[in-house]
Image: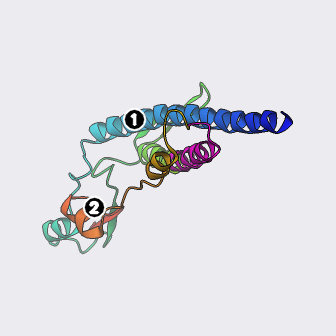
Amino acid sequence: MKQLQEALIDIESDAEQVLLARHQLVENDKVRNANREALTALRKKARTTKTSVPSPFEVIMKEMEGSSGKQLIKEICPTCGDHDPKEHTWLMFPGSDIFARVPFHVVHTVLEKDQECLDLDTKKLQSFVKEKSLVIAEKGALAGSVGLDTVKSIVSLTDKPKSTREAGEMGQSPEVKYQLG
């Protein structure tokens, strides 16, 4: 009887961890969507899209004439484009009600870094949920509804990353471009 009670307590604690992780996934997804919406709004304000920023070679060819007194190479941000990166934008700090006027380039850089961190956290939580679900299935807690082999096959599913050739065909560009100034 004692072993059964310990086994049930163990399964219940694992199940509780899975539920907490799934709840955190939902919260992360809400923040990721809000960040994505904010980045889209910033791109609209700068009148750029991910693919609308000119390539370095186009800019070099256009500005080759009369560049003797100018800076030779200037970075072009894929989000800012030709937008003034020093223009200030209001930013609300996460987890508080504090607003601050921050340069445009800083705002979208912070949001993009937050988005990367949230993506990483989401992947970690998803793998944690998969592992714990497999552990619960191995203990026999899901025996009535789903077989262990089915759970193992679902848990072992992985996404294959795009090859660099496919990414190039999709029109995705590198992080920073350069332009003659």
Dominant secondary structure of the residues highlighted in magenta in the image: helix
Helix, strand, or loop for circle 1?
helix
In the rendered structure, the answer to whether residue 77 lies left or right of residue 145 reads left
In the rendered structure, the answer to whether residue 45 lies left or right of residue 104 reads left
Compared to residue 76, the image places residue 141 above or below, namely: above
Q: Quadrant of the N terminus?
A: top right
For the residue pair 22 and 106, the one nearer the viewer reads as: 22
Labels 1 and 2: the sequence-earlier one: 1
For the residues labelled 1 and 2, the Cα–Cα distance comes to 21 Å
Residue 20 x %, y %: 63, 33
The answer to whether residue 91 is visible is no
User: What residue sits 28% from the left and 66% below the top?
Assistant: 181
Residue 118 x %, y %: 51, 45
Q: From which residue to which does the magenta span run?
A: 121-142
The answer to whether residue 134 is visible is yes
Helix, strand, or loop for circle 2?
loop
Compared to residue 60, the image places residue 3 above or below, namely: above
Dot 2 corresponds to which residue? 173
Q: Which mark is residue 38?
A: 1
Given the image, on which type of amino acid does mark 1 rest? Ala
Residue 55 x %, y %: 21, 64
Compared to residue 107, the image places residue 173 above or below, namely: below
Residue 138 x %, y %: 61, 47
